[in-house]
Image: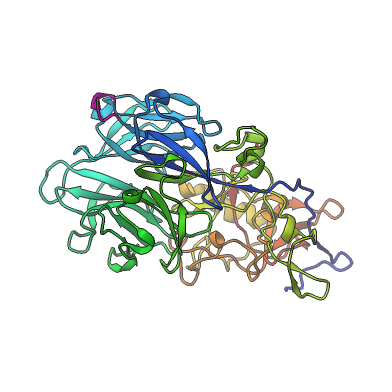
Amino acid sequence: MRNQFKIGLSLTIVAVLTLPSLKVQAALLVSSGETGSILCYDEQTGDFIDTFVPFDSGGLKRPIGLTYGPDINLYVSNVDVNNPANDSILRYDGETGAFIDTFVLPGSGDLKRPADLIFGPDNNLYVSSLAGQGIRRYDGKTGVFIDVVYDTDPSGGQNLNVSGMAFGPDNNLYFSTNFPSSGILRYNTNTGVVDTFVPADIAPEIPGGLAFGLDNNLYVGEFSPNGGISRYDGQTGALIDTFVPAGSGGLNTPSLGVTFGPDNNLYVSSYGNSSVLRYNGQTGAFINTFVFTGSGGLNGPESLTFSPTPVPEPYKRFKRGVRHRCGLPSAMERHRFPATGQMTCWDSSGNLIPCAGTGHDGEIQAGATLRYRDNGNGTITDLNTKLAWEKQSDDGSIHDQNTLYTWDDAFGVHVAELNAANFAGHNDWRVPNAKELQSIVNYENFNPAVSAAFNNNCSGSTVLTGSCTAVSFYWSSTTVAFTPSLAWDVNFNGVVAAIDKSFKSHVRAVRGGSP
């Protein structure tokens, strides 16, 4: 530790957070195509909770793709098999599942057989089509048609069927095509140019759902009874391996539901036997059948998504006939202060002990479960506080974890340069206050004490290929009131200290705030 403590004012402060002991977790939503409903399951156990959106709510016939929008409401691609002229995108309240409106009207932009849907870095809605319509883009606030992103096969010019989509760490759009040829295409969001990322000779025969993992590689499912999950290099498109072999754990026809959960494991909707399977996110080994065949009436699972904010557990159970809630918690609950992340207990001698009955933090785990989303543009969103954090790198750029600043330069140099460059499309970056900075400390970890979102693939990385955190002090914007020449610094082994503003520390910028 650097000797930066001012003489006579050397101190270490550990923040004590007084929080209600209400454990929280997310919910897993699955579109049940054959029953025309959206079902809700417990994130940790896979137990059925409730029908979040019933058949025919708002005209729902066959839900395919699911995604949460920037407004934290649920958007659903709706296919009406009996009357295709009614195909649409429907919006439902993220808390209650109540129908809000038809966000994209039937026929808008020649919408036909919408499949996957995803909000892009521009906050607009991208919709794929299995009726030769490629990908359409709609205004993310109004649902008004903007343009055709891409709709023709790059080799033959024929109309293009697109199933799964995902934005990559480079902010480009990757999408799977199965007609007239199979493969994974890449849409450059800056230039509008489309190229072939994974060619047909190494692509799944019928590519379906796809997702990027924490290793920044691309995972693609094959929509067939003998389909598995293939892994491709996230930068080159080269085939790495068959991450999940066909039939593993009973896998049968993986559909659009290919996603990494809050536990960093891979969840796959197995269409052929109406279940959801879970695989180890690092090895691909089968863990368990997470949602059993037919649970809650599940029939033909198309897509799946985890609610972007944890749901307080008491709302997820039946208690003497009280209906438990599957959607997002209220605004007040959504923005509860994060937990410390500690899940282990030790005695006074430092020996590891069982947590049950101790009353330690590792047992109570008060506060909101730590959950983050890598936005693919050099930033990380805290899904509890809604703060967006600058990622740090190991490449000598302005984001480099090893660059040090005085307190004044944290504002006048680091943050000023980010705003001048309109980093990640924004110019309201700032130095975080002391409580904000402490909120991303994960006290279960050390060297550094952060969650994996802030510390992965660091060596030599850019903010698009990895994430770094120095095991050292970071400036906050908060001055020490009793000695204003000092400011509060947070060390990412969990220590908070008062440090002279003339010394140099690290800086991680933030934007947004908790209402």
Relative depth, front residue between 333 and 146:
333
The quarter holding residue 334 reads top right
Whether 261 is drawn above or below 92: the answer is: below
Q: Residue 433: x, y in percent? A: 70, 50
Residue drawn 64% across and 57% down?
A: 409
Residue 419: x %, y % from top left: 53, 47
Give the left or right position of residue 222, taking residue 404 as reference: left
The residue shown at (20%, 60%) is: 199
Percent across and percent down for residue 71 are 51, 34
Q: Which residues are magenta?
A: 80-86
Q: Identify whether 507 is placed above or below 314.
A: below
Q: Give the camera-side residue of 359 and 136.
A: 359
Q: Is residue 247 left or right of residue 71?
A: left
Pick whichever, 257 or 477, lies toward us: 257
**Quadrant for the N terminus in the image:** bottom right
Q: Quadrant of residue 147?
A: top left
Residue 37 appears left or right of 382: left
Residue occupying image coordinates x 50% and y 59%: 264
